[in-house]
Image: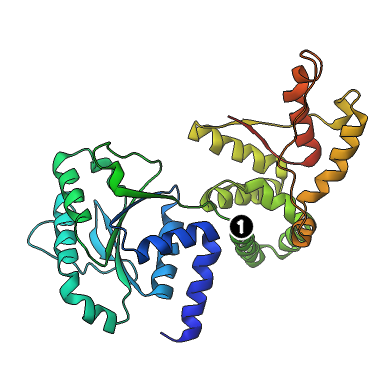
Amino acid sequence: MPKENVDQHEDAYKIMGTKEFNDELIALLKIRAPVVFLTCREEKRMLNYFRHLSEARGFKTYTWDLCNGIRNLISGKQEKTTGDDCTEPDNALNVMIEEASNDKDQRVKLEASKIKGKIYLLLDFYKFLDEPTTERRIKEFSKIDSMTTIILTGPTLDLPVSIENLFSVLDFPYPNNEEIRGSITNLLKAVKKEKVDLHDKLQKQFKKEQHEIIGSVTGLTLSEAQKALSKSVVVKASFDIPSILAEKKQYIRRRGILEYYEPNLTMADVGGLHRMVRWLKHRKLAFSPEAREFGIPALKGFLAAGVPGCVLADTKIMIKKISSEGKHKVIEF
């Protein structure tokens, strides 16, 4: 593959993952960690990440799922065939165990082909881990010194106690600002094909309110963000922040882990505390992209302390008011 193509894949996967995630995953692949559990709520984006990683770093990567069996991630072809049906979990693991057992004999050939290692992405495989025969095969695979790593994916970490010590655990990161910006750019291109006037209006709004628009979908998966933004464009003919946040609230509610509070108050509702209000109004500028580029750290929070029933009794409502003033969401555990 030409170097410029390799560089493009390298840039792509680095953009999609945080530096911490990329470094940790590469380290696990380099030390030949046998089994990894990857929590992920966005399979399509995750597979795209591994396509870029495999092309950039020279890994031969396969996927497994209950419907399609084992397929090459890049070509999509079903390269692994045995006498048994590889859509069946234990039969698929048997193939991987056999392949890993032959890695020592194939190492020279693989390295000559510039293959750094092999990855098997087992999609939704966590559902089968409670089966005794599956547990035993995972244990057998983890004993093999090979160039192969198995990565199991699932929405949440769920491992049987008997094999949890065998796994390294990673969380696939949510999309960052650059990915969301790219998704909005693609949305604008699609709108331009249909309605030039609307495109110009949205383009102007995005240029002016880029920070707020991107922030309104931060914390969602890329597909969720795309749906929320597209719905706002269709229904409101604009990037309507309240409408986008309403969609975001529904996504958060369905996950059942966090509770979203809609900030509907302003600093005018705060009585007294004039110095703190003045400081917060000034300090909120640290959330802007310009401040981040300049190196000013964003405010992570502050501690309000006082006589019970005086300051502390109003702490929660104060936080809601600050959120409204600073145009940032409030999520309570």
196 or 230, which lies in front? 230
46 to 242, vertically: above or below: below
Residue 67: x and y, percent? 24, 53
Extreme-left residue of the structure: 83
Label 1 element class: helix
Q: Position of residue 147 (x, y in %)?
A: 26, 67
Residue tagged by mark 1? 180
Do we see residue 238 in this rendering?
no
- Determine which quarter of the picture holds residue 189: bottom right
Give the residue at the far top of this rendering. Answer: 309
In depth, the one of 108 and 332 nearer the eye is 108
User: In the image as oriented, which residue stretches furthest toward the bottom?
Assistant: 2
Total number of numbered discs in the rendering: 1
Question: Mark 1 Cα within 10 Å, few/some/many (few <14, many 20+)?
Answer: many
Residue 24's spot in the image, x, y percent? 45, 58
Q: Quadrant of residue 277?
A: top right
* Colour convention: rainbow
State whether residue 173 appears in this view: yes
- Measured from the top left, where is residue 66 in percent x and y? 24, 51
Give the quarter of the image for residue 119. bottom left
| Relative to 106, 325 lies left or right | right
The amino acid beneath tag 1 is: Ile
Q: Quadrant of the C terminus?
A: top right
Front one among 201 and 296: 296
Which residue: 78% across, 54% down?
Answer: 296
Q: Nearer the viewer, residue 267 or 185?
A: 267
The quarter in which the N terminus is drawn is: bottom left
* Residue beneath the point at 76% across and 59% down: 295
Question: In the figure, is residue 177 to the left or right of 268?
Answer: left
